[in-house]
Amino acid sequence: MSKTLDSKLVQVAHITDLPPQVGKEVIIGEHEIALFRLTNGKVKAVENKCPHKQGPLSQGIISGEYVFCPLHDWKIDLENGQVQKPDDGCVRTFDVEIVDEMIYIRI
């Protein structure tokens, strides 16, 4: 369940709810978001739909700072949402803040 800290910052999880290298889907209003904790400790959030065939990115495989779509293996940069060549497209990224081990997403 999400909790609003202010009008745009929404609490979505505790850091321990997000194992490294495993995606988690969170829904905030009409936004379906894929949330990831990388091995370097960073937490990233992107739109949970691949631009190719709407594959659920939260179910994708993580490698470094990239997620691979589970449907057709499109490689997406979690920093900027860009699909890597030779494919083309992008997904929306969301700013993430961690305060007292709680994860917040800015909408």
Image (spheres, rainbow, N blue to C red):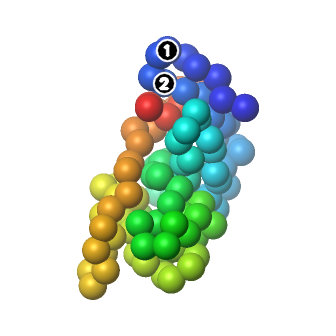
> Could one spot residue 86 in this view of the protein?
yes
Residue lying furthest top = 6
Q: Residue 63 location, x and y as percent?
A: 48, 73
Q: In front: 67, or 57?
A: 57
Q: Which mark is residue 6?
A: 1
Say if mark 1 contacts mark 2, CB within 8 Å: yes
Q: In front: 70, or 13?
A: 70
66 relative to 3 in the view: left or right: left
Q: In front: 32, or 4?
A: 32
Q: Residues within 10 Å of mark 1 (few under 14, many from 20)?
A: few
Q: Residue 79 location, x and y as percent?
A: 34, 55
The amino acid pointed to by label 2 is Leu
Location of mark 2 (residue): 9
**As drawn, 13 above or below 56:** above
Considering the image in quadrants, where does the N terminus appear? top right
Q: Residue 54 location, x and y as percent?
A: 51, 66
Quarter of the image where one finds residue 81: bottom left
Q: How many marks?
A: 2
Considering the image in quadrants, where does the C terminus appear? top left
Q: Residue at x 55, y 69 (%)?
A: 55
Q: Residue at x 27, y 85 (%)?
A: 86
**As drawn, 60 above or below 97:** below
71 relative to 74 in the view: left or right: right
85 relative to 44 in the view: left or right: left
The amino acid pointed to by label 1 is Asp
